[in-house]
Image (spheres, rainbow, N blue to C red):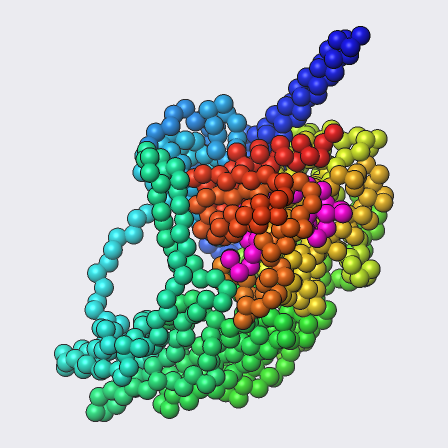
């Protein structure tokens, strides 16, 4: 009897293991199974010379496209299988982009090589390696407008897709590194720039002078008389001069920067197993950390006189302690040459000024000043537009608690009026019409109190992160919201700006493309409505949006849930949160896209959630300020309340088994869940985490944690609190990480060991930041979460 029982248990165990392996294969095959299955979702207009019509190419089936010609005035539409059939000339660049993209496997591994991608699209793309078995292994995203380098080998095949899986290009790596441009017309090799011979020195606008820096001297060359004046600057050894040289528009003066050199911290990176070598390699790079000394550049003004040239140092009383990692100032002259302007972001990010220096006297005055008891989000909310013809400046500020625009008088530094106002933020300025004195911008959170009906029949407020196009006059009058559809809007104006293409979608709603009139936002014609039914038929599940009150019981928190394709409402599923609580942005998806990593995890039998708690961006200053000197908070009180609220009406969410994972700042967040909230979270995977803000890069951490470095850094440190760990923790790190010092993770490892804690640790060789997004790291994360959360 005992033998029979053991045999039955063995069979059940074997069957369970086989079922689990089958789920893994299903999850790993999801990228390939769901590629190229969303149609009519992406278009790029090509405007005809008259500016009144445009054409675009649209995918209507897996291997089928059509061409569409639109009259932008009447909205009339013509379709055809080719441009020629529309009466338009075929284009050489188009011929390559419309050619059939042949997918092929990697068949050989040659010499070590590399690919550099330049994404010139206004949307992210996905990068996959197609291995020898034909599997598509996800290597993450290439962000819109950004560049990315990818290590590879000669002969390896790479696929680039849109966010919804449309095939954009296939590349086979060559023996030598290549730079490739993604621009919506396929993919092309970047042309090598030929070095150009430059004239010695920087020439003045009138062409009569040139100036250059040579050690402690400035050499001023009179190009008319062919004479050179050598100007020696006192104390140059202590404050050497730096370029670039900035001439005034009237050629009567120029400015250089002077700066005392600062010793920069070096980050040592060890490559333990370089290809073809036995011995490790050590790399060093500059890497300033919070509290490190920073340069204090200041301008030196040179003024041409009848007798030669005079110079003076600009008094730094109004900019004594700048936050900058470079030794040069970024300054610009006013068009009349009477003064030059530069910014001062005081270290600690609580004081920000736009300064003006007089071209004759060197006297400095303040045009705009911002102060904050917490922080000024200088990276995203210090936009400006100079209106020199009218002596005005458009400026962005959160001084009233929301990100808005203000109009200043440049000469007096006085505020003329607030341009936008309300309990919603300006998110991005798209265009300033100086002639008609209007600003076109994107804003969110505009429709408080209005609700939309979801597919479930539930009435919910519009997502306050959804972007809408707006217009307003400089004096604050004439405000108009020009887009209305319930979704996140992306705008592309026609060349004459009389119309715009409005593309909007949601995490749970495929894109709609509309042509609208700029004057009032009225609809010209519906261009396309995306078809995602083939994607759903392939086993991809539509995310579900959910809204619940956060920690204060009143503030709405927004996020999504993802279910497996084999979902059974009669069963119980563990819950896993994908966390990234970096204060610089909001992170729950707002556009329609495949979200492959989360869907792959869901296929293993989990409910995946992603949301934005307090401390993240774009919900007003009070919401954002929760992160101030308090990175460890990470919005957890809001996250836990949101997940519990969702589970109240979703009995299939098993809150006795909750996991969490994240990378970078999300890695810090994931481990923090098991330090402070292990009564709710039970398993965590932390990838490349910035576990101690004292160890991470200066510019990100001093922005949110402040300066000088104080006890708040210690109180948010996972290393300091490692002894509090409860639950199952996997730490992952890439040994070549130059974004977050890898020692940040190994110091956490040391602290856990000293505290006699049980945990898992996996350094991944030959890999940089985001090690858990490599095929090996991703599989490891899946296995760990399954092991500790699945029965």
Q: Nearer the viewer, residue 92 or 419?
A: 419
Residue 380, given in percent of the width and then of the height, sits at 56, 65
Residue at coordinates 26% horizontally, 53% vertically from top-left?
Answer: 194
Q: Is residue 105 magenta?
A: no
Q: Nearer the viewer, residue 685 or 38?
A: 685
Please give left or right for residue 469 compared with residue 127 in the image.
right
Residue at coordinates 39% horizontally, 58% vertically from top-left?
Answer: 266
Q: Which residues are magenta?
A: 673-695
Q: Is residue 755 visible?
A: yes
Q: Is residue 691 magenta?
A: yes
Residue 577, given in percent of the width and then of the height, sits at 69, 44
Q: Is residue 62 visible?
A: no
Which quadrant of the figure contains the C terminus?
Answer: top right
Q: In the picture, residue 275 is in which quadrant?
A: top left
Residue at coordinates 35% horizontally, 75% vertically from top-left?
Answer: 259
Residue at coordinates 59% horizontally, 78% vertically from top-left?
Answer: 371
Q: Nearer the viewer, residue 456 or 475?
A: 456
Residue 495, given in percent of the width and then of the height, sits at 51, 59
């Amino acid at each position: 009897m005992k033998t029979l029982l053991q045999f039955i248990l063995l069979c059940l165990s074997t069957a369970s293991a086989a079922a689990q392996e089958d789920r893994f294969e299903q999850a790993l095959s999801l990228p390939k199974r769901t590629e190229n299955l969303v149609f009519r979702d992406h278009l790029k207009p090509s405007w005809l010379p008259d500016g009144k019509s445009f054409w675009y190419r649209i995918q209507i089936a897996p291997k089928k496209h059509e061409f569409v010609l639109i009259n932008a005035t009447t909205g009339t539409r013509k379709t055809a299988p080719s441009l020629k059939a529309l009466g338009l000339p075929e284009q050489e660049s188009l011929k390559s982009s419309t050619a059939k993209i042949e997918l092929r496997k990697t068949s050989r591994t040659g010499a070590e090589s590399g690919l550099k991608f330049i994404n010139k699209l206004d949307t992210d793309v996905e990068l996959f390696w197609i291995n020898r078995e034909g599997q598509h292994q996800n290597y993450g995203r290439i962000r819109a407008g950004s560049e990315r380098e990818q290590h590879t080998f000669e002969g390896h095949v790479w696929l680039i897709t849109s966010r919804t899986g449309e095939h954009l290009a296939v590349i086979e790596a060559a023996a030598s590194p290549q730079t490739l441009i993604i621009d919506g017309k396929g993919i092309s090799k970047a042309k090598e720039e030929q070095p150009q011979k430059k004239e010695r020195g920087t020439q003045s606008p009138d062409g009569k002078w040139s100036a250059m820096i040579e050690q402690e001297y400035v050499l001023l060359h009179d190009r008319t008389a062919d004479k050179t004046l050598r100007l020696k600057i006192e104390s140059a050894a202590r404050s050497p001069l730096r370029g670039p040289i900035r001439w005034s528009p009237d050629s009567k003066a120029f400015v250089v920067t002077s700066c005392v050199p600062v010793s920069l911290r070096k980050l040592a990176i060890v490559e333990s197993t370089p290809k073809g070598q036995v011995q490790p390699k050590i790399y060093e790079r500059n890497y300033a950390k919070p509290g490190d000394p920073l340069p204090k550049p200041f301008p030196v003004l040179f003024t041409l006189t009848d007798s030669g040239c005079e110079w003076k140092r600009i008094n730094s009383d109004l900019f004594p302690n700048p936050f900058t990692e470079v030794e040069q100032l970024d300054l610009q002259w006013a068009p009349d040459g009477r003064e030059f302007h530069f910014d001062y972001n005081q270290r600690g990010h609580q004081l920000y000024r736009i300064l003006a220096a007089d071209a004759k006297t060197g006297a400095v005055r303040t045009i705009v000043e911002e102060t904050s008891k917490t922080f000024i989000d200088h990276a995203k909310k210090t936009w400006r537009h100079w209106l020199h013809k009218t002596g005005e400046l458009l400026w962005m500020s959160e001084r009233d608690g929301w990100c808005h625009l203000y109009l200043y008088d440049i000469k007096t530094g006085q505020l003329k009026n607030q341009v936008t106002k309300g309990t919603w933020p300006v998110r991005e300025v798209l265009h300033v019409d100086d002639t008609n004195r209007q600003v076109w911008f994107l804003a969110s959170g505009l429709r408080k109190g209005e609700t939309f009906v979801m597919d479930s029949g539930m009435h919910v407020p519009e997502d306050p992160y959804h972007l809408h196009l707006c217009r307003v006059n400089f004096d604050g009058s004439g405000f108009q919201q020009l887009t209305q559809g319930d979704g996140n809007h992306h705008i592309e104006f026609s060349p004459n700006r009389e119309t715009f293409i409005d593309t909007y979608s949601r995490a749970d709603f495929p894109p709609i493309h509309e042509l609208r009139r700029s004057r009032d936002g009225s609809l010209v014609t519906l261009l396309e409505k995306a078809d995602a039914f083939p994607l759903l038929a392939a086993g991809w599940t539509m995310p579900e949006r959910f809204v619940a009150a956060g920690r204060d019981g009143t503030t709405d928190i927004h996020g999504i849930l993802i279910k497996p394709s084999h979902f059974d409402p009669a069963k119980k599923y563990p819950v896993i949160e994908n966390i990234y609580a970096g204060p610089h942005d909001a992170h729950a998806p707002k556009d329609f896209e495949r979200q492959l990593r989360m869907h792959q995890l869901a296929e293993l039998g989990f409910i995946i959630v992603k949301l934005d708690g307090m401390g993240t961006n774009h919900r007003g200053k009070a919401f954002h300020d929760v992160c101030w000197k308090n990175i460890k908070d990470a919005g957890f009180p809001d996250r836990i309340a949101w997940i519990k609220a969702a589970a109240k009406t979703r009995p299939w969410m098993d809150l006795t088994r909750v996991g969490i994972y994240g990378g970078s700042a999300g890695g810090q967040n994931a481990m923090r869940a098991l330090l402070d909230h292990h009564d709710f979270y039970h398993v965590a995977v932390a990838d490349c985490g910035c576990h101690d803000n004292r160890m991470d890069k200066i510019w990100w951490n001093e922005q949110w944690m402040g300066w000088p470095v104080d006890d708040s850094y210690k109180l948010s440190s996972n290393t300091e609190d490692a002894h509090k760990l409860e639950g199952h923790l996997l730490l992952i790190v890439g040994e070549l990480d130059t974004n977050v010092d890898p020692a940040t993770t190994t110091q956490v490892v040391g602290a856990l060991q000293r505290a006699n804690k049980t945990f898992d640790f996996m350094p991944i060789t030959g890999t940089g930041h985001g090690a858990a997004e490599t095929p090996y790291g991703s599989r490891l994360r899946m296995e760990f979460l399954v092991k500790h959360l699945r029965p």
